Amino acid sequence: MPSGRSQSLRTWVRTRFWLTPWYKLWALAGEQLWRQFCWAGVLFLVLTVVRLRQWLVDAVPAALRYSFAVGIGLFLTFIGLNQTGVVLLGNAGAPLRAGHLTATPVLVAIFGFLLMAVLMIRRFPAAILIGILATAFLAYLTGVAAPPKTWVSLPPSISPILFSVDFRGALSWGFFPIVLTIFIMAFVDTMGTLIGVSARAGFLDENGNLPQIERPMIADALSMIFAALVGTSTSGAFIESATGVEAGGRTGLTAVVTAICFLGTLFFSPFISAIPPQAYGPVLIVVGLLMLSPITRIRFDDFTELIPSFAVVALISFTYNVGIGITAGFVLYPFCKLVSGRVREIKPGLWVLAGLSLLFFVFYPYP
């Protein structure tokens, strides 16, 4: 399914972003609820066609756009550090702690990071892919991970969940808080990814806008509808698209290759699933490092720009939630401009985003 979505995004949109299911949202709402969120995709499609979605995106100030990229970069870095065992979860007094840095799994991950760093410094083609494969085989040789027992298998049947969509149930009032939360989270996650990755890749124009952004947004909405129909979680452009950008991807061909690779994983899943986090974790760390550069475009001498941008970066990184950080920025930016007497700098669309963000915080399913 990611194969078809990435292909659709490339064929019409001609961009380098990838579409795939958001399994973090699956964990948030539960498997049964996802069969009822076809309406969210329909709503996204309507908002995009009437250009309301683009109107909202255009209202996002440049400082927040660049903070999306930095926050997502640190978010990826933390995921990589945690999955490789360099950083572990701690306790109430110290939420994080260092892993066993001399343990074999961590040393393998450090080797992978250093190998990728050397290849990138030497401008070696396919540095990230070579680093993943070399680190994976080292993990097999050292016993850190078990090699795959088989290489090829048939994909499982999706008939039990195919077209299991409850349209009437999704329209009931009881699902309104859930649908609203998912709608806002999906909206800000996609927008943050498109703008954040584009900021790092240099695709934004002189005003900080992504040209023809409505095209990837329509592809995103269609993929969300398709995801609900086939029984998987909400899908959209995902932040790991940054790895393709850092590997040199600049055209829609990047998404085509990604789609082909995803299609191949349906049959080579035993091998793909055997690749340990010590092999792919360092990639996230490297990409996070490379996504820090847009921070230089944020005005550090203007607290009305710096405070909301800092909130975005900090909350994306420390709450492990892209949506929380972005919506916090939408609330703080107009607040800072309002108290400074510079309310005219706020576009009308940003007030709408601030209102939606407040609703997001009200209805968010806190643990």
Image (tube, helix red, strand yellow):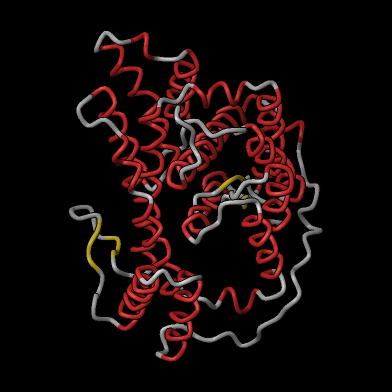
The quadrant the C terminus occupies is top left
Residue that appears at 53% across and 86% down: 147
Percent across and percent down for residue 325 are 38, 37
The quadrant the N terminus occupies is bottom right
Residue that appears at 24% across and 54% down: 95
Above-or-below relation of 304 to 25: above
What is the quadrant of residue 70 in the picture? top left
Percent across and percent down for residue 361 are 42, 29
- In the image, 85 versus 133, the foreground residue is 133
Percent across and percent down for residue 195 are 49, 38
Residue that appears at 55% across and 29% down: 177
- In the image, 130 versus 353, the foreground residue is 130
Above-or-below relation of 285 to 138: above
What is the quadrant of residue 80 in the picture? bottom left
Above-or-below relation of 130 to 3: below
Percent across and percent down for residue 331 are 37, 23
